[in-house]
Amino acid sequence: MPSNLVTSISGVGPQAAERLNNLGIRTVTDLLLHMPRDYQDRTRRTLLRDVVDKECVVQGTIVEVAEHYKNQRGIHVFFEDDTGRGALRLLNYGSYQRNSFRIGSWLYVYGKPAYGNTFIHPQYRVFHEDPGEPTPEFRAVYPATAGISSARLGAWIVQSLQETAFFPKFHHDDLTLEQAVREVHRPTPSAYPDSMHAAFERVVFDEMLAFTLVQRRQRQHKDRETDPLRSVEGLEEKLLHDLGFELTGAQKRVADEVLSDLSKPVAMRRLIQGDVGSGKTVVAALAAIRAAENDTQTAIMAPTELLAEQHYQVFSEWLSPLGIEVGLLTSRMPTRQRRSQQDAITNGHAQVVVGTHALFQEKTIFKRLSLSIIDEQHRFGVHQRMQMTGKGENAHQLVLTATPIPRTLALTMFGDLAVSTIDELPPGRTPIRTTIHANEVREDVIAAVEQQLRNGQQVYWVCVAIDENEETNLSASTTTFEQLKERFRNIGVGHVNGRMKVDEKNEVMTAFRDGEVRLLVATTVIEVGIDVSNATVMVIENAERLGLAQLHQLRGRVGRGGEQSYCLLLYQTPLTGSSRERLEAMRRSTDGFELAEVDLKTRGMGQMFGNRQSGVDPFRVASLASFVERYEELGSVSESLLKENPSLADEIIGTWTPEGQGYAAS
């Protein structure tokens, strides 16, 4: 295949490629690893007399075509088989569609009837002769995005399945990844669902194996020699003096561990975990100062542009007075500005560089990178950590996370890293008061929010769902936004959700940070967000649907200033016993590590990580629960591969590595 980019696929232009990027799809490989969320059963035809209220395949001969039938808008196509009569109704249609419906032609319809035997906007095909029985198939349904339907994704995937020779030729459970991917996207009807489940598990295993291979390789290089970074000019002490506050005992302990690692002739691999606001950034700044004192560079990577800009502002404020040049690099910067910043990185003028995944790009070349700091590591995963390290020869690595991880998982997830914990909040921080409320008293919660807004404070209002859904009965951010915007007409109310474009989200988040928006209605996309010290209230609807780790992470968005802050958890009745226990744990504890252990105990591994609610699951297809369960098997297979076929191990890792980010073996 000449190119692995999605634009090499017929029908995928720049606009479609940008939309696919919202799904994490940049390459043909990404597209083929985009797994179905469901399947449509098209294995047999349903007679019109047997149609019930569920999706089915029907077909028959067109007997009547009418527009605006009996005062009903749209075109109505009536068709019959030997057992009854059905109707296809289109509300929006073109002349080409109208002209394709001819009396006597055959109509194939797949969909769920809206009422009786009437199908509104189903999937259909017109045949000018009897097509016979439909070809049996289970058609995949994919997670989609605005402007890209599941059907379009499916067509591109089927097209791409013609060229899959680039997948590694590695057999496991009698399948290669190529065979498994084919079966997942186009299941064999006679063997469904067993063959599909086996194939999906094979894809899952491949991703977990790639993760394990990188972990093992990291361990192999753990003790590689590098230049020690020692204190030269005393700038660390100057920063601590200029900050105007005393570090906590936990911060001092962790800072000593980090600086001690840097002074050794062995590359540091350390994870710092600590609650939001515990002071991880100060420790990272001390490490960056140490690198600058030794005439080397530091790369600081954040998962979003807003977070990168925030880090840039903080590090500039702290380090610029010390004579340390701080730069910013993001992929959405104007081309001229980005190239100028890349030149400053290459010639060494930029000593500390804050950025997003743009720091991974091949065009970003550091003069002498000795330290990489990765914030909110779960947003990147182990592959990207390794790629960042590869930007410098045996660079030290510091990984930060505000997501508390149960101690029982730390060795499994971060076996290649030493772990430091900041388990003490800075003095002066007022604990957040957490209260629990049934949805029946929602009006009282709104009244409490109104009082805070009148006092000049800012408020987050988080919803689990974006749109209304009768089946789930979840409060939706779109509806809540409209309601609260109407209620608080004289106060800036904003809305962000995961379907919005990055620029749109950034615009609203920036307005909230700057105080132009006072009440921000959001989905959980703000779990990792910006610091807004004036935000004192966090309302979370359907809190019973979220895990403790995510609830705690959301709660950490408030309480950044000196004012008393509040977290109000709204729930739908009735509550299950385990849901009540989780919400009570949130009410009584502000210790993220304690809550993580409670979450693991009350929900178990599968539930805790099954819905990507933990914030620490690094996988695209697999789950952390599966990874932990198969950890020993994965370790055995990976050790064997690294020993007997390291080039195949590279291929497996490369399959799951994002495009253009240059996997680095060192």
Image (cartoon, helix red, strand yellow):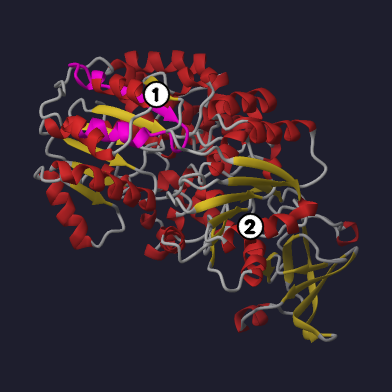
Residue at 32 percent of width and 41 percent of height: 301
Can you identify the residue that label 1 sits on?
250
Instruction: Verify whether residue 284 appears in magenta.
Output: yes
Taking the magenta stretch, the answer to whether it contains residue 585 is no
In the foreground, 284 or 67:
284
Q: Earlier in the sequence, mark 2 or mark 1?
A: 1
Q: What residue is at 81 percent from the left and 45 percent from the top?
A: 573
Mark number, residue 74: none
Q: Position of residue 180 (x, y in %)?
A: 53, 34
Q: Which residue is mark 2?
A: 449
Question: In which quadrant of the rendered view does residue 336 lie?
Answer: bottom left
Q: Secondary structure at mark 1?
A: helix
Identified at 45% across, 13% down, the residue is 636
Residue type at mark 2?
Val
Relative to 155, residue 254 above or below: above
Say if 130 sits above or below 24 in the image. Answer: below
Q: Is residue 612 visible?
A: no
Apparent side of residue 315 relative to residue 304 in the rendered image (left or right): left
In the rendered image, is residue 160 in sight?
yes
Quadrant occupied by the C terminus: top left
Amino acid identity at mark 1: Ala
- Please provide percent x and percent y for residue 307: 38, 48
Where on the picture, by quarter, is residue 263?
top left
Q: Position of residue 568 (x, y in %)?
A: 65, 47
Above or below — where is 223 with respect to 452? above
- Span colored in magenta: 260-289
